[in-house]
Image: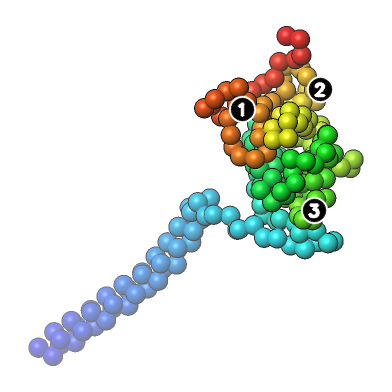
């Protein structure tokens, strides 16, 4: 009887040690595997505002995370610009009265040259060219066409790097205020379309 109890106790102890060891191994490996599998599912770090050279720069914001990224598209890039313009309009109350004539004006405004000294586009972002222009994914300045105080059309010259040709990407009626329908298109979102050359 004592021998039987000793064998039973030894067996239980051995079983317990094996179970604990197996559980540790599974838990350690399982967590690593789960973390690796869920890495793409994890939310990115929240954006932070950092004071740099007298300007509050948004680091990790939508522009820095999504503009010109590999695997993206020019249409997505134009939507990112529209979203950044919407944010700027919410903060800068005099936005509608600003003399924004061309790419350099918009790029300067969005990279910190505004009344709040706030940069949605970090001044060191590679999409800002040496001339201070915001460049598309092919290195060509994005065309900002301000249709009114509230509506700006955005155009990328496309892969041929020549504006006003058939491969241009156009975000028409890009309102810097809200993600609103394009002018004269009630109830429809502003489409991104390849643009036809003028006169066709």
Label 2, on which residue? 162
Label 3, on which residue? 115
Figure quadrant of the N terminus? bottom left
Q: SS for tag 2?
A: loop
The foreground one among 9 and 132 is: 132
Q: Residue 151 location, x and y as percent?
A: 69, 32
Q: Residue 78 location, x and y as percent?
A: 68, 34
Label 1, on which residue? 182
Eyeballing the image, is 38 above or below 143? Answer: below
How far apart are the two marked residues, 1 and 2, measured between alpha carbons?
25 Å
- Comparing labels 1 and 2, the label whose residue is closer to the camera: 1
Q: Are marks 1 and 3 in contact (CB under 8 Å)?
A: no
Query: Mark 1 or mark 3, which has the lower sequence index?
Result: 3
Q: SS for tag 1?
A: loop
Query: Mark 2 or mark 3, which has the lower sequence index?
Result: 3
Asked if residue 65 shows in the view, the reply is no
Figure quadrant of the C terminus? top right
């Amino acid at each position: 009887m004592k021998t039987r109890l000793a064998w039973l106790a030894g067996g239980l102890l051995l079983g317990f040690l094996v179970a604990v060891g197996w559980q540790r191994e599974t838990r350690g490996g399982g967590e690593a595997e789960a973390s690796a599998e869920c890495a793409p599912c994890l939310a990115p770090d929240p954006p932070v505002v950092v004071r740099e050279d007298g300007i509050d720069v948004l680091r990790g914001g939508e522009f820095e995370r999504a503009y010109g990224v590999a695997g993206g598209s020019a249409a997505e890039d134009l939507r990112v610009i529209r979203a950044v313009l919407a944010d700027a309009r919410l903060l800068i109350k005099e936005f509608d009265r600003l003399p924004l004539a061309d790419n350099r004006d918009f790029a300067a405004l969005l990279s910190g040259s505004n009344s709040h000294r706030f940069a949605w586009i970090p001044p060191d972002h590679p999409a800002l060219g040496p001339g201070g222009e915001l460049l598309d994914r092919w290195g060509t300045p994005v065309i900002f066409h301000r249709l009114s105080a509230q509506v700006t059309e955005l155009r990328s010259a496309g892969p041929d790097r020549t504006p006003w040709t058939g491969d241009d990407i156009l975000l028409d009626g890009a309102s810097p205020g809200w993600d609103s329908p394009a002018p004269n298109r009630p109830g429809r979102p502003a489409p991104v379309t390849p643009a036809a050359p003028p006169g066709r």
